[in-house]
Amino acid sequence: MTKARRISARGGAGILMTAMIAWVAVTVSRAGSVHPAEFSREMLRASFDSDMRNVVYRWSQDDPRSDTEKRNALFNFVYQTYDSSAWIPQSLFDGNLATQAVVGDLDTIVRDKVGLVLWRDNVRVRAFGMAPNTTPGEPLKLTVNCLTCHTAEIDGVVYFGAGTKTFDDKWLGDSLKLLTSDRWRGIMLRDPKDELYAAAANGILNRHHHEKIDSLTRARSTAFAASHVELYMRPHNGTMPSNDEVGRGDVKTPPLWHTAAKVQSGRWYADGSFHGRVPMMASSMELEKDRPFDALVQTVIPTIKQEFDSVIAHLRPPRYPYDIDPALAERGRQLFY
């Protein structure tokens, strides 16, 4: 494979300004602080039905649950944080003159620069995949979840569970590393709690970065390559593997309904390399947020299992018209291993 040509980085001021604009856009489009009470689970749930009114999704006709039970399961999934260790404080953006100066163009920036799917009917959370903390008394802060990659807008219509084709995780990561750096934290943050969250996020973004697994293009997933890097680091005192020890795993993000179809047979890859009720490899993505293995065992994996039982398994999946071609599967295995 030929080495991908890298695009030179923008100047520091340009990245910083756009990152601040993007992140304030995914929460609130007005300047100033937002009291965390507005982001309580009760208030988010109260508006959820209205917030989802223009999003396309379908439940299986065989699902025996009531509409309320299904909506509650979907709400929990959409705002899932897995008790994240990586948070970005909202106060990094409050009152910033740069964001106020271009307030009329916020949606364009978050859609075109970051590539997130705008949640136009939600007045609190402006893009799918952004999950706020709901702990009373804590500063408002945000993390990302599955819907960042598993929601897409197609011809102006938002489809829950479609694989994104526009999210630029490398661009956003580079911008946030600068925004949460020592220099800018000291300028923009006043609350010691916010300082601790921003410093922790900066450490995670830098410690867990390996250039070999950066996405080559927008909306490409390198989750499995990243997971293998994390699994290497844990028994090696946090040391990164060398470039030649890391294979690039750059693939399009699959839709959730693709997963819903595969769950029927428990076969996740064409070469038969993974079997089981739930693709537990997905849980290792949380390792990139500096989560310990204990957190995966105690929190993340049980939550994913519950979500599959309550949400993914009940989405109306497609029916594949043919079986896996063994010869073609073997060819794919040889290409990637």
Image (cartoon, helix red, strand yellow):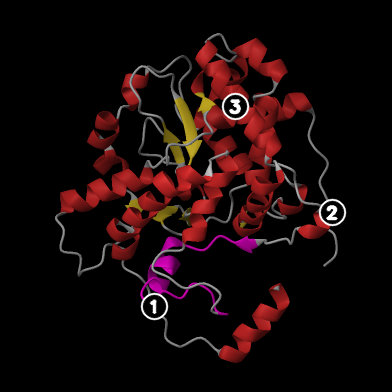
The image quarter containing residue 202 is: top right
Q: Which residue bears the numbered disc 2?
A: 5
Q: Position of residue 297 (x, y in %)?
A: 44, 49
Residue located farthest toward the top when viewing the structure as drawn:
190
Look at label 3 and name its amino acid: Ala
- Image point 60% across, 27% down: which residue? 200
Look at label 2 and name its amino acid: Arg
Q: Position of residue 228 (x, y in %)?
A: 65, 56
Q: Give the class, few, some or many, for how many residues have Cα within 10 Å of label 2's Cα (few <14, many ≥20).
A: few
Q: Give the class, few, some or many, for how many residues have Cα within 10 Å of label 3's Cα (few <14, many ≥20).
A: some
Q: Which residue bears the numbered disc 3?
A: 200
Q: Is residue 123 left or right of residue 215?
A: left
- Total of numbered circles in the picture? 3
Q: Which residues are magenta?
A: 251-271
Q: Give the class, few, some or many, for how many residues have Cα within 10 Å of label 1's Cα (few <14, many ≥20).
A: few
Q: Spatial distance from mark 1 to mark 3, Cα to Cα?
A: 41 Å
